Image (cartoon, rainbow, N blue to C red):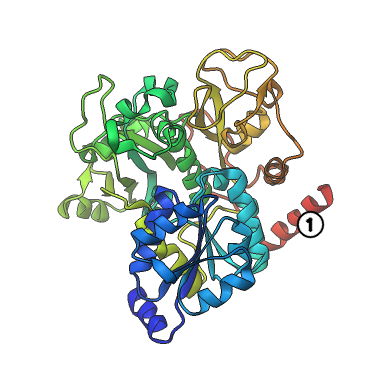
Amino acid sequence: MLSERLAARERDGRPIRVGVVGAGRFGTMIICQLAAMRGMRPSVVADLDVARARTALAHGGVTGDRVVEAGRAALANPVIARGDSVVTADAAVLVESDVDVVVDATGSPEAASATAQAAIRRGRHVVMVTVEADVLVGSVLRRAADAAGVVYSAAYGDQPALIYELYDWATALGLEVVAAGKGTKYLPAYRKGVPDDIWERYGMPGHANAGLNPKMYNSFMDGTKSAIEMAAVANMTGLHPDIRGMHFPPVGTDRLPEVLKPKEDGGILGRSGVVEVVSSIDRDGQPVPNDLRWGVYVVFTSPRPYVRGAFRDYGLSVDGTGRYASFYRPYHLVGLELPISAARAVLDGAPTGTPRPVPCAAVVSAAKRALRPGDVLDGEGGSTVYGLADDAVAASRERLLPIGLSHGARVVRAVPEDGLVHLDDVALDTSAPLYRLWEEQQRLLDGSGEEMEPRRPETNPRHPDRRLSDRRRSDRRRSNRRKA
């Protein structure tokens, strides 16, 4: 048992030393839970606001002389060795210190990718909370981690890793996954939402939202965060968005297999093997019965009638044909569950979900309003663009602007409301490290069509995933290095 192995490390005086970059709400949840666990420690917390890092540790009961501020790794390491915690304003101090795992919870793809690269170079395992960075450059980071012999992992407790777990459970049993995804509160009108009015739409008015980031919560509501998370799931599993932007059907847990099945069997899907988000409210704004707002699900089938009969016999939600069934988890505990990822990385050398070596999905930008030359985009959760989950090859072929590169982009060519934003429509800093890393990920798509499922008409079935052999992947890596 994982708990027994962690308890053994506690008895042996070898707790897993975790460094957390970012002491916001997600980071604070991680730190609090680590402080409560046997065999793990919140050894270093890095935040530009050191007082916030101290507050996060205090929520976990780590206070007083058990917390030391350090500006150099040499000063941090003795504190870590005696089992106490370090706070620092410099993420580099955390990465260079004696931690076993680096967790990025900044929410900034620029900072997250830089921290991950530095940690991998230092031989540290990485748990990536910042899904925006994972979708944009995760395959490159995963390849770097593989080469360094460390783990690059999605964050257990966040929805993508939990969806991956359900997908893995189903496919390991030989079931065919028809759809996998999560629930959220969504209406098409929310696409145009801006940070100024987010709290009323989110259902968190007044003092309950104090200290929270309105842009982040707006991204939850306008569909962008859902697009990012589903692209992350697609890149881990090989599932694809059914259509650009997904359907977002209003569906409760009792009707998942009835709605999320192929059209030829009465559902809404153009094919089997997709990622999809379900809404907890109907298009008229009324609550959906048995909603899955906080949960995750998988819809599956089996070619064997006896197995399909067991679905119904054991109480699963089954569609009218008896062919499709669903399994779901109603809640996720976000940062509180993340220590599982850190433990698995150290104890098993395994991730709780990681991108495939070549991405299959991306998140592209669309205009919330008409954009004019001279406008500056404010990125995810802002007032100028929203994100749509898309096929990676199609997005690359059409030169669409990734949502992860949209912040600060200056419009040079008009884009109509709801129009897709192309790379040629904006001016970007192409010398920025994140842009160069994204270019490296784009090169993974060059000439790799045999690995990818291109966009097809909705009625076509899913083709099996075809992955390159180890030798061909190695040849591709050498080719990419020569191109770079």
Residue drawn 21% across the image and 55% down it: 310
Say if residue 260 shows up in the picture.
Answer: no
The amino acid type of the residue labelled 1 equals Arg
Q: Nearer the viewer, residue 315 or 94?
A: 94
Residue drawn 52% across the image and 71% down it: 349
Estimate the x, y position of residue 464 in percent, counting from the top left. 52, 48
In this rendering, the answer to whether 207 lies above or below 4 is above
Quadrant into which the N terminus falls: bottom left
Say if residue 318 shows up in the picture.
Answer: yes
Q: Nearer the viewer, residue 475 or 305?
A: 475
- The residue under label 1 is 478
Residue 61 found in image quarter: bottom left
In this rendering, the answer to whether 188 lies above or below 54 is above
Residue drawn 60% across the image and 69% down it: 97
Estimate the x, y position of residue 289 in percent, counting from the top left. 18, 34
Apparent side of residue 446 relative to residue 93 in the rendered image (left or right): right
Marks counted in the figure total 1
Estimate the x, y position of residue 165 in percent, counting from the top left. 39, 56
Estimate the x, y position of residue 155 in percent, counting from the top left. 45, 55
**Which secondary structure lies at badge 1?**
helix
Q: Residue furthest bottom?
A: 12
Apparent side of residue 331 relative to residue 75 in the rendered image (left or right): left
Residue drawn 81% across the image and 48% down it: 484
How many C-alpha atoms fall within 10 Å of the one at disc 1: few (<14), some, or many (≥20)? few
Apparent side of residue 7 relative to residue 251 in the rendered image (left or right): right
In this rendering, the answer to whether 470 lies above or below 82 is above
